[in-house]
Amino acid sequence: MVKPTEPVLNPGDEAKPGTPGAAEDICDTCSGSGKLANGKPCPECGGSGRVMRGIGGG
């Protein structure tokens, strides 16, 4: 039987994908490019340019 894998969270992620009240957003550190000014992958988003953020409460 195959075990479901947990999504990899990056330091900039506030929640796992699919969490109610969270959504994908542009990474503030790299402005969505996935790279830093020196050309290296952004450590906050893991190079994707996107992070998961809390969007609402309740």
Image: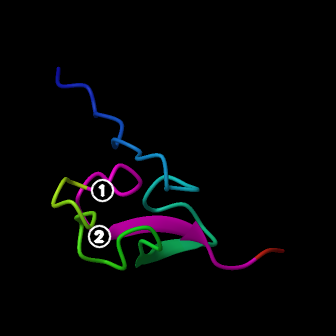
Residue visible at 25% across and 25% down in the picture: 3
Is tag 2's residue or tag 1's residue first in the polypeptide sequence? 1
Pointer 1 residue: 42
Q: Is residue 28 left or right of residue 1?
A: right
Q: Quadrant of residue 44?
A: bottom left
Residue visible at 47% across and 74% down in the picture: 28
- Helix, strand, or loop for circle 1? loop
- Helix, strand, or loop for circle 2? loop
**Magenta residues?**
42-56
Residue visible at 49% across and 55% down in the picture: 12
Pointer 2 residue: 49
- Identify the coloring: rainbow
Q: Amino acid at mark 1?
A: Cys
Q: Is residue 49 left or right of residue 39?
A: right
Extreme residue toward the right, this view: 58
Labels 2 & 1 near each other (Cβ < 8 A):
yes
Nearer-the-camera pick, 36 or 21: 36
- Location of residue 51 in the rendering, given as x and y in whole percent from the top left corner: 42, 65
